[in-house]
Image: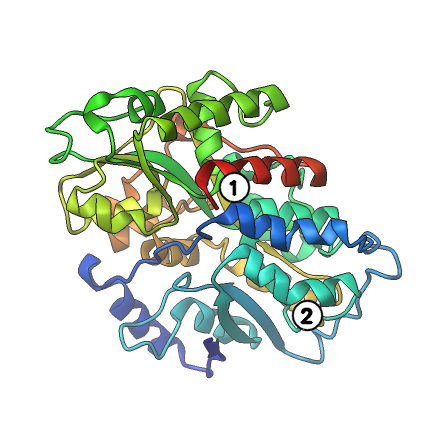
Amino acid sequence: MEQYEPERLSAAQLAAMRRTLTSGRGALTRRSLLRASGTGALALGGLGVLSACGIPPAKREGDAAAASDDHSAKEKQVNFSNWTEYMDVTDDGKHRPSLEQFTERTGIKVKYTEDINDNVEFFGKIKPQLAAGQDTGRDIICVTDWLAARIVRLGWAQKLDPSNLPHAYANLSAQFRSPDWDPGRAYSYPWAGIPTVIAYNSKATGGRRIDSVSQLLDDPKLKGRVSFLSEMRDSIGMTLLDMGKDPATFTDADYDAAIGRIQKGVDRNQIRRFTGNDYTADLDKGDIAACVAWAGDIIQLQAGNPDIKYAIPAAGYVISSDNMLVPVKARHKTNAEKLMDHYYRPPVAAELAAYINFVCPVDGVREELARIDRSMADNPLILPDKKMAAASHAFRSLTAEEETAYEEKFAKLIGA
């Protein structure tokens, strides 16, 4: 586990570090998204237990039980828990320029910890404190939207003060402004978007373009060389779209039909396996010819293999997001909000996007990103154009009962 607390550096030193970090595409380290493999079983064991044990939700923000004393004015610090490899860092690993810029500008020190490797595992760490209305020791946590939705629903996230988030409020991309689990972003702001696309190795497909779930499931030339993701919302969501159903409004019957359709691919040995992000090595080698994939992984693979291609199906694609929340009883809420807002300043957002290569949720960064790397600024997997944004679909929020039932069915499908 990494803990990072920046020293105070001069503006000249910060500028030098920024030049080092962004001095060439080959020098960039990109995050390989670490997702749960076998998430169905994990979700049942980690999330389903919560409701099964009858743990009551905390009262909503504004109630005495959820309100927290804010020590931001006296304690000029903020504690931030994030995913691994999800923050810009210099090549020597000693400095994180965007965090140090924040400290230089505000005087607020950041204790930065990369202790999130899996949503369910991390939730298991903080669930006892959240349920008891206790401080988790973290002022910002960054979790994927389905878990963020659950934390908000349970009343375990603090409502944000818009007066501390002027850049975030002004610059948040329309695509991310109003998820069904947090309309108007009262409790959260996205850190990055995660598109799910179709990827293929053109050498392995004989030069053929693969651009639909139907091809993955039905093309005999791909038999045994197809993979789907072990993340239920991505694999089911993409299949629903291919069937003409909207992941934002599907019914139980629609879900069962999607499960049945993928099951046929399993039964015919069309699907080789269900994976976390470990599909990347097989796709790179050509052992997997085509798959459902996360866009950030594909950008990374393309840097070293020109045969790796991606396609946005005509039916559209699924997008999720990792989101910043302030847990109940966090000691430094105002400082946390100021740090969130820092990452919605276009120059800072561009630096982050250049490093992590996932969808930037901040408007107005194109020119800033072009100064770092023109190809990134022109890549719709990092900065979606209007057509790309319009093709995106979010998987709707689930009730506790739906989540348990759907994950159980999916776990059976993938053999988890």
Q: Which numbered disc flags the more N-terminal residue, 1 or 2?
A: 2
- Say above or below: 74 vs 147: below
Q: Residues within 10 Å of mark 1 (few under 14, many from 20)?
A: many
Q: Which mark is residue 383?
A: none
Q: Which residue is mark 1?
A: 411
Tell me how far mark 1 sits from mark 2, CA to CA: 30 Å
**Observer-nearest of 253 and 84:** 253
370 or 268, which lies in front?
Answer: 268
Considering every residue shown, the one lying at the far front of the view is 267
Label 1, secondary structure: give it: helix
Would you name the residue on which mark 2 appears?
A: 136
Q: Is residue 74 left or right of residue 16?
A: right
Please state which amino acid type lies under the numbered disc 2: Thr
Instruction: Give the percent coordinates (x, y) of residue 44.
Output: 61, 48
Residue 58, image x, y percentages: 81, 56
For this orientation, the residue located farthest to the right is: 64
| Quarter occupied by residue 136 | bottom right
Q: Position of residue 139 (x, y in %)?
A: 64, 67
In the rendered view, tell whether residue 160 sits above or below residue 407: below
Image coords of residue 286 (percent x, y): 16, 42
**Residue displayed at 67% across by 37% down:** 183
In the image, what residue occupies the spot 40% across and 24% down?
A: 264
Whether residue 398 is visible: yes
Q: Secondary structure at mark 2?
A: loop
Specify whether 397 is left or right of 328. Answer: left
Question: Is 148 rendered above or below residue 212?
Answer: below
